[in-house]
Image: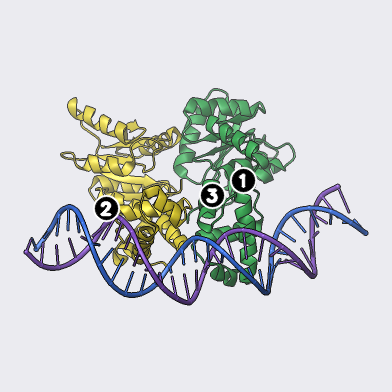
Chain colours: A green, B yellow, C blue, D purple
Amino acid sequence: MIRVLLVDDHPVVRRGLRAMVDELPGVEAAGEAADGAAALRFLAEARESGEPGPDVVLMDLQMGDGMHGVEATRRITALPEPPAVLILTTYSTDADILAAVEAGATGYLLKDAPPEDVAAAVHATARGETVLAPPVAARLLGRVRAGRPALSPREIEILRLLAEGLANKQISRRLFISEATVKTHLVHIYDKLDVDSRTAAIAAGLSMGLIRPT
Amino acid sequence: MIRVLLVDDHPVVRRGLRAMVDELPGVEAAGEAADGAAALRFLAEARESGEPGPDVVLMDLQMGDGMHGVEATRRITALPEPPAVLILTTYSTDADILAAVEAGATGYLLKDAPPEDVAAAVHATARGETVLAPPVAARLLGRVRAGRPALSPREIEILRLLAEGLANKQISRRLFISEATVKTHLVHIYDKLDVDSRTAAIAAGLSMGLIRPT
DNA sequence: CTTCCCATCATCCGTTCGATTGATTCCGGC
DNA sequence: GCCGGAATCAATCGAACGGATGATGGGAAG
């Protein structure tokens, strides 16, 4: 019997997953969690009480204010004898996929996948196999070939403020640094993203999922 | 008995909605559709066969490649004796909300709403009452007070190219107009959006849903 | 210990952008 | 028939931006 923990901030989605999972032969829902922190608590409690923990964690990525799925995945896979983590999310930016895989996710599915695919993926994941939705795999391959930009945290921060429409001087004041420093960061950002203007940097950042529209 | 049609492109979500709806007393799922076009077909068939059509349509907005929820809502409410349309979507830009309400939606809920709220909303909608999630209502009020900008088609086009990161000269070449004209359009755009730079215009356009990240 | 990356700041220069003003054409409404 | 909005273009000017170069200090990796 494969035991599955469902992690999603939407009650509706949890209900749907539970319904789908429970009707699969040899699979049962072990529990639900509304965000990453709740998932970790669930796993900890199961271990304390000596129960058999879940074999597979079905994890969403964006979860409102709660702990993000990537962070939760990172912590779960750091546990001793961790369950397999199968990401099931609505849409996939390059950055999300890379971050999830790097955090130790065993699979990556999209929510518009047909139920059979989800079922197959749960079984495969329980066996330890890696599962990637075709569009996800394609993006991953394209990205590995391209070599990712890897902006530093500071650069991401600057990029975010750029996308809010701030001018260099405003950014400098917001971050308590000089305008010269802002410009230097911008040069590096343009370099890594292979663009040559702030607007193009915003466009590139959005399309690569480095930043999100507010 | 309130009959509900579920429209969402994610099988998982449809399953969840069906489970939630079916366990409400006096409510039953009348059918499912994966996009707007399928929903319209369902309604048409029900009417042809003389069956009682659904009383409430639970409608998502973004639905992959299929017909968008706003368009579907517009067509449904244009039918004779239309069912009530309750929008249930993940997130809400100002433009989405306005468009949905203007298209005739009776309610607007967010997917992270607790099941009780969804249940209450279905009942209220069936009675013909208007239901707005609190954050949605707040946005709507703020917007009505502000009065929206109403960019011309050409201006929207320019704004889109802005968001792609193009410089004025590139935009002018792309649209076969002079750079001076591009600048003139930009002045008007800044004026209407109440901003004073191209990046701020992009930010404003995104947050108001005038443009979407590619 | 040296090397590399990150973050910080500075100066200089050419380009682009934004603001202003003014003009022409076309189209639809009063 | 007149008026107003949309779209087109032009010229000017100061401010903002982008590119190039160089410099410092700190921390991680080797």
Query: Measured from the top left, where is residue C6 in percent x and y?
Result: 71, 58
Q: Secondary structure at mark 2?
A: loop
Q: Is residue B29 visible?
A: yes
In the picture, the quarter occupied by the N terminus of chain B is top left
Q: Tell me the quarter of the picture where residue B14 sits.
A: top left
Q: Secondary structure at mark 3?
A: helix
Q: Which mark, residue A204?
A: 3
Residue shown at the point (27%, 42%) measured from the top left: B73
Q: Which chain hosts label 2? A: B
Distance (Cα) linking label 2 and label 3: 40 Å
Residue B209 image point, x, y percent:
38, 53
> Which amino acid lies under the numbered mark 2 shown in the image of this protein?
Thr
Q: Is residue B212 above or below residue B68?
A: below
Q: What residue sits right under mark 1 in the picture?
A: A70
Within-10-Å neighbours for mark 3: few <14, some 14–19, many 20+: many
Parent chain of label 1 = A
Mark 1 belongs to which amino acid? Val
Which residue lies at the image location 45% right of the left edge and 61% below the top edge?
B198
Q: Residues within 10 Å of mark 1 (few under 14, many from 20)?
A: many
Counting other residues with Cα less than 10 Å from the Cα at mark 2, is it few (<14), some (14-19), or many (20 or more)?
A: some
Given this view, does label 1 or label 3 mark the residue nearer the observer? 3
Report the Cα–Cα distance between label 1 and label 2.
38 Å
Q: Residue at x 41, y 66 (%)?
A: B195
Q: Are marks 1 and 2 in contact (CB under 8 Å)?
A: no
From the top left corner, tell me how far across and down residue B47 is, in percent. Answer: 19, 30
Q: Is residue B3 left or right of residue B78?
A: right
Q: Which residue is mark 2?
A: B130
Judged by depth in the image, the label closer to the viewer, 2 or 3, is 3
Foreground pick, B33 / B207:
B207
Amino acid at circle 3: Ala
x then y, percent, for residue A132: 58, 31
